[in-house]
């Protein structure tokens, strides 16, 4: 019995045996994973266009927080750079919230919906799925960050002074890479520990906000700021970006030179992505050994 | 390699699966041995908790066996999961996968990307499958607004995106109403028939569904396979005699003359309620148990001699439930049996 290719709409099979069909060249594996990244990013991108309510929740409401800090600094007669710090921090908050609330909980949610099992059953790497989630979220957050930055700068008269555009952009993208790497790690931890991880995130949210220096230079926190810079990508990224975006002001003195902070961000990005990859491997092994992680309700 | 020389579609040897649990581990599968040939439509029939889904999870590489080995088209489920995932797909009953905000078309396209199908080819295939499963009207409808039956058709289309060599269907009609269940069954049969060599493993606790669809089946209970065979073979296990129901215009002198015939094991006239109030029936029903079908000729001749004419003749066959009861000593309650079960 030979399965010959046919013109039936049911048949899309180029190979003549399951053994042929199961052996994929490396290029096909790579292409499939690249397509998976785009495929998984797609619902996020579509969702952004289809449900415009996020414009209100994701842009207008957080912008009010940023504005509140601007008014507080003005009331305290703080140096004008502080308004710029707040606007920059407000823009970067978009990414932090996206990582903490969407990225981290995503795999846990996917498991509840029954999608995780289908991801595991597909011939793809879970890293591609996570990358797809990250890129989808990133696009949405970039839009929000750009709006906050633009509107904040125009509305509150922020004047940026940039000498090293390339380094500033590099630090920005390195911050995002490290941040979303952390998001991927958190996503796996959420899946492993479920609700406990969720509660832990809620517990840590405000302290992390504080030590990240979203609304003030983290260097003012001394040792605590230095510690934050060593573990939180947002803290080190923002410290470097402030130094690079407001050159020449004594208020922008950072905890470390921006070049050094860029190196820290590279190390963080590599570390978090490698850790996420390792944890995903652990999760898949656990899922197959214990049968708990992928099945709904377990 | 042609299918005639290819390894078994499913080859499971001494597969055992134990789940860690408190206070004691749960044995979901005792030693399971199973062979399914390429191109076969094979069913696993058993009550809830029998171990059917655990076996499917092992064969679809989502779960490792605690001991024993299982191969799908020659690929080891423990070590060669990448190969198996490229040639199989799975659809489960009550599946709510995907994203509600996506349209039907978009959701299928997203899943097509997970099998490396090119973007344009993906859209083309998605449209074909939408037509095939009859979701044309829902093509641009949000997934969240689909009915349960439409949702399962969508799941079925998802399962066909990569044109799997082996298709695992885990209770695919669970929770569907009669017409939706029938539509899904028809799709399965149509897809299977389109290309020789397609293999399906179906689990169900709907006996009639398994009997209707499967060429061979295994009856599973408490993690063990109790019997394997075609539905007819399995029924023969409990059918030691041929049972006929005869409807005659008259039978004077009772069943004694019939019981005396060679090959007749028993003959009886069952009691039945009156046809109308106070009115006797115009016909007589006789239940006959024969040693084999050949004895029926003698019965027909004898009835002619008794001046009795046959109005109707019906052969009674045991059901798979009878087989299950014979094997296990109890029936199995299948919640929702009346819903999606074939009629």
Image: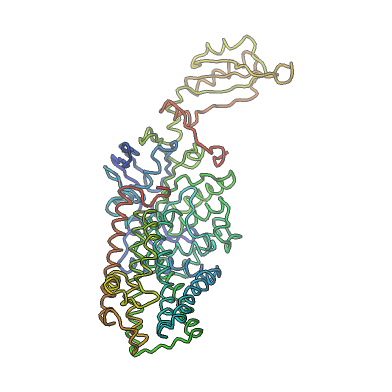
From this view, report whether residue A259 is shown above or below residue A110.
Answer: below
Q: How is the image coloured?
A: rainbow
- The residue nearer to you, when weighing A180 against A10, is A180
Q: Residue at x 40, y 49 (%)?
A: A295
- The residue nearer to you, when weighing B328 against A115, is A115
Quarter assignment of residue A194 = bottom left
Q: How many marks?
A: 0
Would residue B6 be seen by someone viewing this image from the given angle?
A: no
Q: Residue at x 40, y 62 (%)?
A: B115
> Which percent across, then down, holds residue B204?
46, 41
Q: Residue at x 47, y 55 (%)?
A: B97
> Which percent across, then down, holds residue A99?
40, 67
With B297 as the anchor, is B222 left or right in this view?
left
Would residue B152 be seen by someone viewing this image from the given angle?
A: yes
- The residue nearer to you, when weighing A253 against A133, is A253
From this view, report whether residue A185 is shown above or below residue A247.
Answer: above
> Which percent across, then down, holds residue B279?
74, 17
> Which percent across, then down, holds residue B49?
41, 38
Quarter assignment of residue B48 = top left
With B316 as the anchor, is A110 left or right in this view?
left
């Amino acid at each position: 019995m030979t399965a010959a290719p046919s013109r039936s709409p049911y048949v899309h099979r180029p190979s003549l045996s399951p053994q042929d069909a199961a052996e994929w060249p490396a290029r096909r594996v790579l292409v499939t994973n690249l397509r998976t990244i785009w495929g998984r990013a797609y619902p996020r991108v579509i969702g952004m266009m289809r449900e415009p309510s996020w414009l209100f929740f994701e842009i207008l409401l957080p912008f009010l927080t940023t504005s509140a800090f601007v008014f507080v600094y003005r009331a305290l007669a703080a140096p004008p750079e502080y308004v710029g710090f707040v606007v920059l921090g407000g823009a970067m908050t978009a990414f932090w919230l996206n990582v903490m609330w969407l990225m981290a909980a995503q795999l846990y949610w996917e498991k509840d919906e029954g999608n995780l099992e289908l991801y595991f059953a597909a011939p793809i790497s879970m890293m591609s799925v996570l990358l797809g989630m990250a890129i989808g979220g990133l696009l949405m957050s970039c839009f929000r960050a750009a709006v906050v930055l633009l509107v904040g700068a125009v509305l509150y008269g922020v004047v940026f002074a940039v000498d090293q555009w390339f380094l500033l952009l590099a630090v920005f993208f390195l911050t995002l890479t490290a941040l979303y790497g952390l998001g991927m790690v958190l996503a796996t931890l959420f899946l492993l520990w479920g609700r406990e991880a969720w509660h832990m995130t809620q517990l840590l949210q405000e302290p992390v906000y504080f030590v990240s220096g979203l609304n003030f230079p983290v260097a003012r926190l001394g040792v605590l700021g230095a510690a934050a810079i060593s573990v939180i990508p947002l803290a080190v990224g923002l410290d470097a970006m402030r130094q690079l975006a407001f050159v020449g002001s004594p208020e922008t003195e950072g905890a470390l030179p921006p070049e050094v902070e860029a190196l820290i961000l590279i190390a963080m990005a590599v570390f978090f992505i490698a850790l996420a990859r390792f944890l995903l491997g652990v999760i898949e092994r656990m899922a197959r050994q214990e049968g708990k992680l992928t099945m709904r309700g377990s | 390699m042609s299918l005639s020389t290819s390894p078994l579609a499913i080859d499971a040897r001494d597969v055992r699966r134990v789940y860690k649990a408190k206070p004691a581990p749960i044995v979901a599968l005792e030693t399971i041995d199973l062979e399914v040939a390429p191109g076969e439509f094979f069913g696993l029939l058993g009550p809830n908790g029998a171990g059917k889904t655990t076996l499917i999870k092992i064969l679809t590489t989502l779960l490792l066996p605690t001991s024993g080995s299982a191969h799908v088209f020659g690929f080891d489920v423990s070590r060669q999961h990448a190969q198996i995932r490229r040639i199989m797909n799975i659809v489960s009953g009550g599946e709510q996968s995907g994203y509600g905000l996506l349209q039907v078309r978009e959701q299928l396209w997203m899943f097509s990307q997970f099998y490396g199908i090119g973007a344009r080819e993906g859209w083309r295939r998605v449209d074909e499958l939408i037509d095939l499963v009859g979701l044309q009207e829902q093509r641009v409808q949000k997934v969240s607004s689909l009915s349960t039956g439409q949702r399962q058709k969508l799941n079925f289309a998802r399962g066909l995106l990569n044109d799997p060599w082996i298709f695992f269907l885990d209770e695919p009609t669970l929770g569907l109403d009669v017409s939706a269940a029938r539509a899904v069954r028809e799709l399965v049969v149509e897809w299977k028939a389109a290309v020789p060599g397609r293999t399906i493993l179906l689990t169900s606790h709907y006996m009639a569904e398994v009997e209707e669809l499967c060429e061979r089946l295994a009856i599973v209970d408490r993690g063990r396979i109790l019997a394997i065979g075609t539905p007819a073979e399995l029924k023969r296990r409990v059918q030691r005699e041929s049972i006929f129901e005869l409807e005659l215009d008259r039978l004077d002198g009772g069943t004694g003359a019939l019981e005396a015939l060679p090959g007749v094991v028993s003959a009886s006239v069952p009691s039945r309620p009156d046809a109308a109030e106070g009115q006797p029936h115009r016909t007589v029903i006789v239940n006959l148990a024969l040693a084999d079908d050949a004895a029926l000729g003698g019965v027909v001749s004898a009835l002619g001699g008794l001046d009795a004419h046959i109005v109707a003749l019906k052969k009674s066959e045991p059901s798979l439930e009878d087989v299950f009861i014979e094997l296990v000593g109890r029936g199995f309650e299948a919640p929702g049996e009346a819903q999606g079960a074939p009629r």
